[in-house]
Image: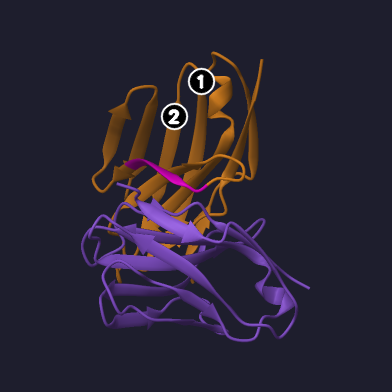
Amino acid sequence: NAGVTQTPKFQVLKTGQSMTLQCAQDMNHEYMSWYRQDPGMGLRLIHYSVGAGITDQGEVPNGYNVSRSTTEDFPLRLLSAAPSQTSVYFCASSYGSEAKKLFFGSGTQLSVL
Amino acid sequence: GQNIDQPTEMTATEGAIVQINCTYQTSGFNGLFWYQQHAGEAPTFLSYNVLDGLEEKGRFSSFLSRSKGYSYLLLKELQMKDSASYLCAVVDSNYQLIWGAGTKLIIKP
């Protein structure tokens, strides 16, 4: 039982490049989400999903896309990276359709130059 | 707007007791979480309060007063491994989590 697996651990991009952060969970959780964490700020919700085929925007969705084709996977796509997207990204999941007790992936440190 | 306030940083001594406060103003309330986050790691669940009162779990306790919009996390018998950030998060009326910026706790020998 691996829990929430998030890759990569570190990534450096140039402005304008695109990339996908991968997130998979093996706990059969309905709820999955992506957060970014910046110094001095609380975790901010980017996108979330309450089940396969269902996604919704969070607090800071601009510049990011998500899809949920299966219960297990919830990738986050950066369409055209900008320096403002330099951050630590966390994928998190929970049982049920609401944000309850969250299980987090190990995080991705992303730098956009 | 919605707001969660926590102290930015606190320092305590090994073996002592520390209380980390969290005050909130949110649109609705459906529970409050405390998470622990060691540097460079992911947050991990510590406690969940939805009713007023004190919940005790080993060395850690969490208290909630919904009428005052206030919670605290109490850590007893502090150990060096308790050095971490402690995140307070409130579940709002839309069942979304609103996060505080976290309190960095420094434990000194």
Color used for chain B?
orange
Q: Dot 2: within a 10 Å radius of its alpha carbon, few (fewer than 14), some, or many (20 or more) residues?
A: some
**Percent of width and height locating residue A79:** 58, 86
**Viewer can see residue B67:** no
Q: Secondary structure at mark 2?
A: strand
Q: Residues within 10 Å of mark 1 (few under 14, many from 20)?
A: some
- Residue at x 26%, y 42% (from the top left corner): B52
Q: Is residue B79 left or right of residue A102?
A: right
Label 1 sits on what residue type? Ile
Q: Position of A96 compared to B33: left or right? A: left
In the displayed structure, does residue A25 sit left or right of residue B39? Answer: left
Q: Chain of mark 1?
A: B
Task: Name the residue tied to disc 2.
Answer: B74
Q: Residue furthest right?
A: A113
The quarter of the displayed image where residue B49 is located: top left
Chain painted purple = A
Q: Is residue A88 above or below residue A74?
A: above
Give the extent of the magenta segment.
B42-47
Quadrant where the C terminus of chain A is found in the figure: bottom right
Q: Position of residue B100 (x, y in %)?
A: 52, 55
Q: Amino acid at mark 2?
A: Leu
Q: Residue at x 36, y 30 (%)?
A: B61
